[in-house]
Each structure stands twice: as C-alpha cells, then as structure tokens.
Amino acid sequence: MKSIFQIFFLLILGVQFSGCNQEPTLQKYFVNHQNNENYVMVDLPAGMFLSFNDELANADQEAIESIKKVSVLAYPLNGSNTANYESEVAVLNKILSQEKYKLLMKIGNTTKGMRIAYLGEEKAIDEVVFFGNDSDKGFIVARVLGEKMNVGELMKLVGNLENGDIKLNLKQFESTLKKLDEIES
C-alpha cells in the first residue's frame, strides 16, 4: 500500500514539473526589472489618460472600456548601462518571437526599430505589446492590458485620437509623471 502511494506521489510530482513553463514571459521580465535602477517603470490605469465624449460611437466607447491598464518599462541609455543594452534587447526579441505573440507590425532594423504584437485572438485580445529600440537612446516596452480588445477597433481609436474625437487627459498624466520623478529624486 505504501508503494502505491509513493508511485502516485511521484506521478503527480512528474506531471506538475512537466507542466511548469520555464519559457521567459514579458510579465516576468517586467517584474524582474521593476526595481532595477537602469529601468523606469510606470503602470497607468486607462482612465488616467483616456477620456471620451458621449458622442462617440458605441464601438469606440467599448474599445476604450476594454483597455484596463498600460504598463511601460523603459531602458534609457545613459553611458554607464550601454554594455547590457544589446543583451536586454536580445532577451525581449526572444520573448516577443514566441509563437503566442502574434505580430501586427515590425519596422526598422537591429539598431533601431519597432514591433507591435498581441496575445489572444484578433477579436478578443488580452494584451497589445509595443517594443521600440534605438541603439543611441535605449528601448521602451509598453503592455496595453485589457479584456477582449479588438485590433480593428483599437486601430479606429488611433484614428479618432488623431481626429480629436478622443482626448488625452495629459494634465493628470503629467502630474503622475512629476510625482514619480519626485519620488525617484
């Protein structure tokens, strides 16, 4: 009887270890670097910088409401951290080249470029990722987190933003950045 329990325990343990995903994720990358002095991290609820008026179409309002939070992690080059820049960009490129990230757009080359990808299904996106790098300035990664976001609707939002139909609440956004700067000083 004791050997049956041992075999059962080993079987459960084996299943748990085989189910653990050791693949690096963008979320782990953010968590591992949030307190690193070479990085700047900001988490913003969507309501902090997006506001919309009642005249917008329901689809636009739903698209805005599907955005829950934006997390930004930046690695500005300052002379003392340039040695790690290429290895950090390589790590992010490896993460974003995983099959689960669906590429929307990629422009540039190895020294300067931008990539936009998403997680989820086209009409039910959970996360949109913007990754931009410049070997002279550093890199920035932004995660737009939401619930059932729609690529087409998000692209329409960008158009409406350019037309002025959607207003950025930059005063509150700038106020938050100033407070963060004061904390870091």
Image: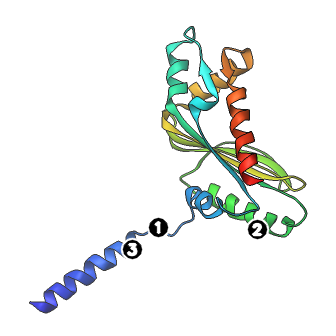
In the image, what residue occupies the spot 49% across and 23% down? 62
Residue 49 location (% of width, % of height): 64, 29
Query: Under tag 2, what secondary structure?
Result: helix
Who is closer to the viewer here, 101 or 73?
73
Which residue extends farthest left?
1
Say above or below: 169 vs 36. Answer: above
In the image, what residue occupies the spot 72% across and 27% down? 171
| Mark 3 / mark 2, whichever is N-terminal | 3
Dot 2: within a 10 Å radius of its alpha carbon, few (fewer than 14), some, or many (20 or more) residues? few
- Which numbered dot is residue 21? 1
Label 3 vs label 2, nearer the camera: 2
Residue 81 location (% of width, % of height): 84, 66
Q: Is residue 76 visible?
A: yes
Residue 156 location (% of width, % of height): 63, 22
Amino acid bearing label 2: Ser
Q: CA distance from mark 3 to mark 2?
A: 28 Å
Query: Under tag 1, what secondary structure?
Result: loop
Q: Is residue 132 left or right of residue 167?
A: right
Residue picked out by circle 3: 18
- For residue 167, which quarter of the picture? top right
Dot 1: within a 10 Å radius of its alpha carbon, few (fewer than 14), some, or many (20 or more) residues? few
Residue picked out by circle 2: 87
| Mark 1 / mark 2, whichever is N-terminal | 1
- For residue 98, which quarter of the picture? bottom right
Q: Do the residues bearing badges 3 and 2 touch, measured as CB atoms within 8 Å?
A: no
Who is closer to the viewer here, 46 or 37?
37
Residue 104 location (% of width, % of height): 65, 40
Amino acid bearing label 1: Asn
Amino acid bearing label 3: Ser
Q: CA distance from mark 1 to mark 2?
A: 22 Å
